[in-house]
Image: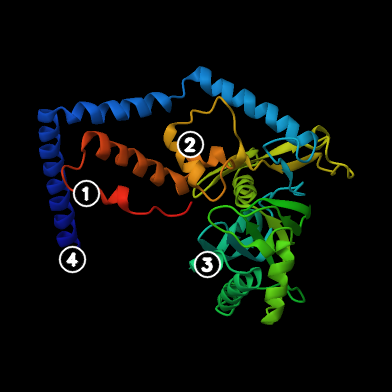
Amino acid sequence: MGKVTVAATVVCAAAVCAAAALVVRRRMKSTGRWARAVAILKEMEEKCGTPIGKLRQVADAMTVEMHAGLASEGGSKLKMLISYVDNLPTGDEKGLFYALDLGGTNFRVLRVQLGGREGRVVKQEFEEVSIPPHLMTGSSHELFDYIAAALAKFVATEGEGFHVSPGRQRELGFTFSFPVRQTSIASGDLIKWTKGFSIEDTVGEDVVGELTKAMERIGLDMRVAALVNDTIGTLAGGRYHNKDAIAAVILGTGTNAAYVERAHAIPKWHGLLPKSGEMVINMEWGNFRSSHLPLTEYDEALDTESLNPGEQIFEKIISGMYLGEIVRRVLCRMAEEANFFGLLTCRLCITTHLQI
């Protein structure tokens, strides 16, 4: 009965909205405001256009930046970070593994029991934890203590079906989805925060070291075995299920891409070539910028008022954290120039928007 009531309510609400939209449209048409609103949307559509020719220009510009980023540190808008991941999963893995995924306003903790080629994923559990806003701009100590406490609480609930190999310490894969200059498979220094985080005393520090110290402070016996970002984690997951997977793209709060590169095609790699002959590259393509990108006045205004003007341009025009704000700005212009919301004051325009 409850489901029927909810469904009926949703249908009624949708009908009311549709009727209201029809009334508004008729009134706007009668006053000529509809034509102005349509013109604003048409202008937006044209400026955002991506015909095949433009897409090829963007792809060519990104290819140039990729080669420059592989050649030297700081030589490109794309960081093309070496991940130190030279082998991806095969599907033969066995045992209990933990994971911590930190990449936005929430983080997830997960455990999985793998049973090899035949058993695959035997059992898995996870929890999602929200990060209080004040910790996103506080201190490194406070943030990692909060994360370690949540992780310890999760480990304490480990039940039947999960088995740590005798004599082995629990191992953790740390997915850290912010720009990091990796120094080994299990260490990396934070280059900068994105996605609304701004914790100065973490920049330049080894994020694995910060997490390890936090775990030690509360007595959690666990070792970080690997540091990756979410894009590389996605690529690893893809390879686990499909041996032909060679690239991964994230389109969420932010955006990024990672792919498998031939090790000898990375001029800035000065170590011994890995036995696999391959190396996973973390592009950090959110910072890509080109004159060929279809930037509008709304994108430019958003960038100017953001926490990091001039940076992460590609991310700001396609990822989830920013698209809502772009829509708000378009609606405000429609309200101001076409009186789109009638005589009522447009709260969308007078409300101070969130810092982005």
- Residue 300 bears which disc, if any? 2
Verify CB contact (< 8 Å) between mark 3 and mark 1: no
**Is 57 in front, or is 353?**
353
Nearest to N terminus: mark 1 or mark 2: 2
Q: Is residue 130 visible?
A: no
Residue 284 occupies which quadrant of the picture?
Answer: top right
Verify CB contact (< 8 Å) between mark 4 and mark 2: no
Q: Secondary structure at mark 1?
A: loop
- Measured from the top left, where is residue 145 in percent x and y? 62, 75
Q: Nearer the viewer, mark 3 or mark 1?
A: 1
Nearest to N terminus: mark 1 or mark 4: 4
- Kind of residue sitting beneath label 3: Glu
How many C-alpha atoms fall within 10 Å of the one at disc 2: few (<14), some, or many (≥20)?
Answer: some
Q: Nearer the viewer, mark 2 or mark 3?
A: 2
Relative to residue 278, is residue 131 drawn left or right?
A: left
How many C-alpha atoms fall within 10 Å of the one at disc 4: few (<14), some, or many (≥20)?
Answer: few
- For disc 4, the marked residue is 2
How many C-alpha atoms fall within 10 Å of the one at disc 3: few (<14), some, or many (≥20)?
Answer: few
In three-dimensional space, the C-alpha distance between marks 2 and 3, rounded to whole angstroms, equals 42 Å
Q: Nearer the viewer, mark 4 or mark 2?
A: 2
